[in-house]
Amino acid sequence: LQDGLLPPKHVAIIMDGNGRWALKNALPRSAGHRKGAETVRMAVEFCCELGIPYLTLFAFSSENWKRPKNEVQTLMGLLRFYLQDEIEKLFDAGVRLTVIGDRSGLENDIQALIASAEARTKPNNRLNLMVALNYGGRREILLAVQSLVSDINSGKIDLEDLDEVGFGRYLETSEVPDPDL
């Protein structure tokens, strides 16, 4: 980087606007989603080149199920393609893939592809790529609170000892530094 600036440790990208971009350019929304997937590849390569250790992609929120069925099918098809055909490239580049979100809402074959991709890339540490699928921030907070209450009730933690850092340990992202950008 220029002027001796260090790269950020964690970049997070909300993948939004691909469909609108396509419509603005007189293309079908699906073309926008394919273009967005190409942009993801460039972002992964860029992070690897700069030595950014964490990249989070908010790819498919729990709210996205409300989109038209054909659009959701296109997005799931893209997900399948990348989980099947791009994992070896990620592995070779030293990328570790982790998926957060409610996997139970995804089709069984996609769940299996995610598990396989995570297992394949687990030894890597050049870039930690976290993809949020069927993810909702409120759901994550609710699950964290439920787990926290369970630990309080069982005496594992005292409510008075809880602080922001302690609460953060209950989040799906507990092992990841907060995004810088």
Image: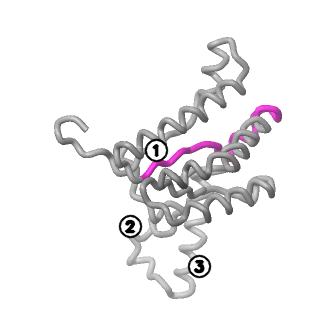
- Say whether residue 29 is magenta: no
Element type at marker 1?
A: strand
Q: Residue 131: x percent and y percent?
A: 57, 50
On the image, the x and y values in percent for residue 41 come to 54, 38
Q: Amino acid at mark 1?
A: Ala
Q: Amino acid at mark 2?
A: Val
**Residues in magenta, as a range:** 54-71
Quadrant in the rendering for residue 126: bottom left
* The disc label shown at residue 150, or none: 3
114 to the left or right of 97: right
Q: Earlier in the sequence, mark 2 or mark 3?
A: 3
Q: Is residue 163 left or right of residue 37?
A: left
Query: In the picture shown, does residue 28 fall above or below 162?
Result: above
Quick check: is 57 in the magenta stretch?
Answer: yes
Residue bearing mark 2: 165
Q: Could you tell me which quadrant the C terminus lies in?
A: top left
Between discs 3 and 1, the one toward the N terminus: 1
Say which amino acid is labelled 3: Ser
